[in-house]
Structure formats: structure tokens, C-alpha cells
Image: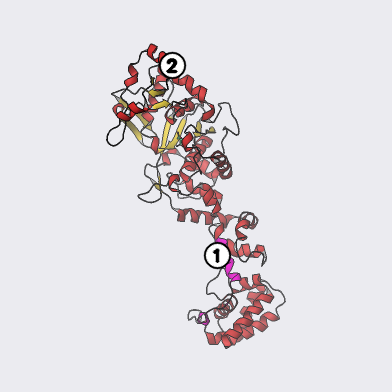
Amino acid sequence: MKKVRTRFAPSPTGYLHIGGLRTALYGFLYSKMNGGDFILRIEDTDTARYVDGSVQIIYDTMRDSKIMYDEGPDVGGDFGPYVQSERKNIYTEYAKKLVELGGAYYCFCSPERIETLKDDAGNMRYDKHCLSLSKEEIEQKIANGEPYVIRQNVPESGTGTYYDLVYGEISVDYKDIEDGILIKSDGMPTYNFANVIDDHLMGITHVIRGIEYLSSTPKYNLMYDAYGWERPVYIHLPPIMKDAQHKLSKRNGDASYEDFVKKGYVKESIVNYIALLGWSPKGNVEKMNLDELIQNFSLEGIGKSPAIFDETKMKWLSGEYIKEMSDVEFKEKAYEFLKQSKAYGKYDEDKLLSLAKGRVSIYSEIAEKIDFLEEFGDYELELFENQKQKSSIELAKDLLPKIKSTLESLQDWNNSSLFNALVELSASLEVKKQALLWIMRIAITGKQSTAGGATEVADILGKEATLERIDYSINKVNK
Ligand code: GLU
């Protein structure tokens, strides 16, 4: 069997959006599961849409997400150049060949003439006007320096049929396909031409790309057939929707990989989630790192129906990855986000991180989980009133001085010694320990819910700050 070769062929038009990265990921997974090659090709022939810096974004995103290619502009390979704007001569040569084969023709029609072909809605169908030019006429016009394009010569009748691995048999009547431009007047190819030439010359066996190319594929097949080349296997991917009505698209500014990393998602979880957008694994397991994805991926699992991008689910996955992380890894990855908390620099950072770790799904939630440590101030006395915890303002008035003296004499200041001391105190006072811990928590945080129990918080605050806060609260309940 031929070695599997897949490619990702983005146009450098801005951020690498989620849909693009999914295409890359599926191509990567399919090649890797078959011991094949994954190629990156930059499709930059549409200069009007070119955005400076976006090629670098593509390189960076693919490396960062570990969807790494074996061949590409910045890593080389035997099938280069891998940037289309550097392949102009190749396209010219093959376009000429296609003209000779009857699959394309020179067109010298002026923009004014093209204008007259437009219908009321502004749609244009080229009328094959230049197809009838003789060889001599064409040579003469070229010699005169007349501008021209090269158009595909699509049959006027008949049907183009092929089998797509996801969407099944696709048929398009040639009468519905127009003689599109293959080479523009500036000598640059259009996507419609370049994708065929490059996929063939680069030995691509499986073309994996978005559904928007499903119905134009018959016109590409006409070219493969005209050259006598083997058609690749086609795998078109379902669209990714923001919701039932709206497509997720970079034109609408929908998020890119980079945005989600900035938002604090675990990188592996983004890739993991993207894999699930249109592909369903066989078992129930959805959390899979890249190696597991390579092992489990299958083209049969790709569905036809649009995938809905569900950020809540991605967040859940991210949280699952955090749960599995070692403290060391969490610290390394979360540190930049820890810095955004008001509590940063004020307390032991390892304790802050462990307070946050089991409680966040994405790193950027760290601040909101631990900022409370630095937000102590005036609070509602009513917070002490809690029937469920068997707590009241009266009880707080009674217990707080006792808690204070217990803690003052405590030797080791850590979560478990604090906890033991307070449990002992509650037993000797014959009050429910949950009531005492509730009162302690309100007294040192002023909040009814915080990350971490009263003693964990007291441990982080340290003895001095904890006792200060208890004093403040004793004053408050006695006012
Ligand atoms: N350059 C095309 C795009 O960005 C690639 C389509 C393809 O994979 O063939 O949409």
C-alpha cells in the first residue's frame, strides 16, 4: 500500500481558528495512525486576503498544540517549496500542459465584457467566448502583451461523480460548474488550480478539508483525469457551528486556539475537544491526549452533521486535565495566571496553588477563587446566622474569644493542627464542630463560601493575620 500522506493547507489570513486546527488535527491523526507523513503547505496566492504575521501564527500554533508536521516551509522536505507563492513556475508549466490537453484555455476578455455577462443578481457565467480562438490568434494576443487568464474548460453536459468518505457519493452536473479561472492575469494560480497541482506533486493520498469544497471537487477531478493522475481519497469535514444557526468562523471573530490558551485552557484539552468536533470515539471515553487520539481515531467516526462548539464541555475537559496534573506541573502552567490574583505575593504560593487546584477548570479562574483572601473587610453580621450549620450571631459572640485564645496558644500553624485544635475545642464546649468552623470561616473571610475550609484559609493567612481578623470580628459582633 502507498504511504499515507495528508496535508494541512491553510491560507495565511489571520488567526488559526478552531475549524482550521481541526482540519490539521484530523490530517495529522490519520497520517500518524497509518505511519504516514503530515505536510504543511501555505496557500498564499490570494494576496488580497493575506495578513502579515499569520504564517508565523500557523507555525507557532501547530508546534504549541503538538500537531506537528513532517514537511513544511520551515522544516523542509523533498516535495517543496511548501509555499504556493514560491511555486509560480510550476503552475505556469502545468497550466500550459492542461491547455494542450484541452482541459483549459486562454481567455482575453476585458473586464468590461465580463461585466456584460452578469445577470441582475450580479452572478456571472463565462460563456466560453475565448474557447474558439485559434492557436495563432492566441499566440498573437500574447505576443501583443494582451492581459489574459487561463480558464478551466468544463464540459457543457454530463455529471461529475466521486465518493467522499464522509458524505458518500457526490454528483454534480457539469452544466452547473462554470469555467473558473485557474491562472489569474498576474500569473498567480487560484486555489482551484493550485490545490490539484500541489496535492498531486506532493504525493497527497488523502485530502482532508472543510465541507465548503465538497461540491467543487468534481471540477478538481476533471483536472486529475485530464492529466491522467490518480485522484486522492476525499474526506470532507462537517461544519462547526456556534449554535444551530451560526457557523463558527474566523470572519466573525470566533475564538482561535491562541485565544483559548490566553483564556487559561489546558492546551491538551483544547486539542482533545477539537478532536471531538465531528468525530465520535467508539467507546465512552472522551478524554484523550494526543497519543490516545492517534490510537483511537478513525475516519468512520466522522459524522455528517454539523458539530456544535460547546465551550462548557471544553472547560470541563480542561478541568479534568488539571485534576490529573502533578502540583509541580500545575505550578509551572498556572503561574502566569496566579500572578493575576490580588493574593499573589502576599502568601505562600504553593499553598495558594493547592487551594485553587481542585477548584478550577481553566487557569484564569484561579484569581476569582483566591482573591477573597485579600478582600476581607466589612461584612454582614447576618452571615453568622445559619440554621443548617447551627450557627448564630449569639453563638459567634460566645465562641470567637475562645477560638482566639485556642489559636493564640497553638504551636504548629498548619491546616491539620488548626483543624484538630478547633475540633477539640468544639468537643470541650459541646458545640457542633460544623457551627464552630462556620463561625471561624465567616470571622476570617467575611464570606459564606470560599475555596477551602476555615482552617485551610487560616493556614494560608498565617497566625498574625488570622488573629487580627478574629479580633476585628469580635469587635463587630459586640458592637
Ligand atoms: N487554503 C484552503 C483554505 O484555507 C485549504 C483548503 C484545502 O485544504 O484544500 O480553506
Residue 179 in sight in this render: yes
Q: Within the magenta stretch, is there residue 104?
A: no
Residue 58 relative to residue 206: left or right: right
Q: Position of residue 77 (x, y in %)?
A: 59, 29
Q: Amino acid at mark 2?
A: Asn
Report the span colored magenta: 365-383
From the viewer's side, name the closer residue of 167 and 426.
Answer: 167
Residue 284 against residue 11 in the figure, above or below = below
At horizontal 39% and vertical 35% (from top left) the residue drawn is: 213
**SS majority, magenta:** helix
Q: Residue at x 65, y 70 (%)?
A: 460
On screen, residue 243 versus residue 448, left or right, reads: left
Asked if the magenta segment contains residue 378, the reply would be yes
Residue beneath disc 1: 368
Rendered location of residue 58, percent (x, y): 54, 40
Crowding at mark 1 (Cα within 10 Å: few <14, some 14-19, many 20+): some
Q: Secondary structure at mark 1?
A: helix
Image vertical order of residue 300 relative to residue 149, above or below: below
In this figure, which residue is indicated by the disc labeled 2?
144
Figure colour scheme: secondary structure
Which x, y percent locates residue 246? 37, 49
Q: Tell which tag, 1 or 2, sits nearer the viewer.
A: 2
- Check the image and name the residue furthest to the top: 136
Q: What secondary structure is marked by label 2?
A: loop
Count of number-bearing discs: 2
- Closer to the chain start, of discs 1 and 2, is 2
**Residue 166 appears at what percent x and percent y?**
39, 37
Mark 2 neighbour class, 10 Å CA radius: few under 14, some 14 to 19, many 20 or more: few
Residue at the extreme right: 411
409 above or below 23? Answer: below
Amino acid type at image mark 1 = Glu
Front residue (pair 181, 19):
181
